[in-house]
Amino acid sequence: MPKLKTQIFFPYSVEKIYNMVINIEEYPQFLPNCSHLDIKNHQKIDKIDHFTAEMGVKFASFTEKFTSNVVANQKKNSILVSLSSGPLKNLSNQWQFEKHENGCMANFSIEIEMKNLVLRLALAAAFKVGVNDITNAFITRADTLYKSSK
């Protein structure tokens, strides 16, 4: 199962980057291959946001959707995502945001596995490039939103 951990530096505050990442309904505007993202069943329990999110993914002629459970804890500057349903066998990712002297360091980890063996092999071959594209999309999005307000 492909796994990756990376750190992403943003020259913006932890609050700004947390708010950008948790604003998942805007992902189709900037995230590669994301066709739609809808929030379902949003609840706030002890100041922690819990919701289900449905994401549409398109890649070449391949179109799928999957549902994830999201737990967002702004007090701890963390976002946890786990698979609820869809064509994946496993999906989990985590964001942890830390103050850095010149902005924010985001620790991002992701694990993903497809149910279908052929798709699993294709994903393994393209995984690192895909995560790099996602990382760059978040960096570009942060600059688009916040560069002029630094």
Image (tube, grey):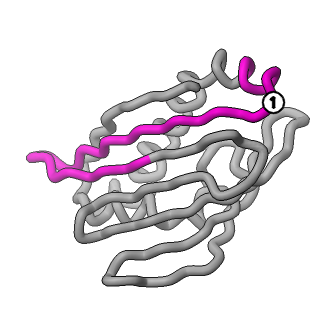
The quarter of the displayed image where residue 113 is located: top right
* Quadrant including the N terminus: top right
Say which residue appears at 43% left-offset and 75% top-offset.
49
Q: Residue 5: where, in percent of width, then height?
A: 38, 31
Position above or below: 105 against 21 = above
**Tally of numbered tags:** 1
Residue 58 is situated, as x and y percent measured from the top left of the image, at 79, 43
Please indicate whether residue 123 sits to the left or right of residue 21 in the image: right
Magenta region includes residue 116: yes
User: Tag 1: residue type?
Assistant: Asn
Quarter holding the C terminus?
Answer: bottom left
Measured as percent of width and height from the top left, residue 115 is found at 76, 34
Give the extent of the magenta segment. 94-122
Horizontal and vertical percent position of residue 16: 31, 63
SS class of the residue under badge 1? loop
The residue under label 1 is: 116
Q: Is residue 138 above or below residue 75?
A: above
Q: Residue at 60% of width from left, 69% of height from top?
A: 52
Question: Could you tell me which residue is drawn at 48 percent across and 73 percent down?
Answer: 50
Name the one closer to the observer, 139 or 7.
Answer: 7
Residue occupying image coordinates x 61% and y 58%: 68
- Decide: few, some or many residues near mark 1? Use Cα within 10 Å; few <14, some 14-19, many ≥20: few
**Is 83 a magenta residue?**
no
Above-or-below relation of 119 to 38: above
Q: Which is nearer the eye, 116 or 98?
A: 116
Residue 49 shown left or right of residue 37 in the figure: left
Which one is nearer the viewer's eye here, 1 or 65? 1
Q: Is residue 18 rendered to the left or right of residue 113?
A: left
Q: Is residue 92 left or right of residue 55?
A: left
Please say if 47 is above or below 108: below
Question: Taken as a whole, is the magenta stretch helix, strand or loop?
Answer: strand
Specify the farthest residue to the left: 101
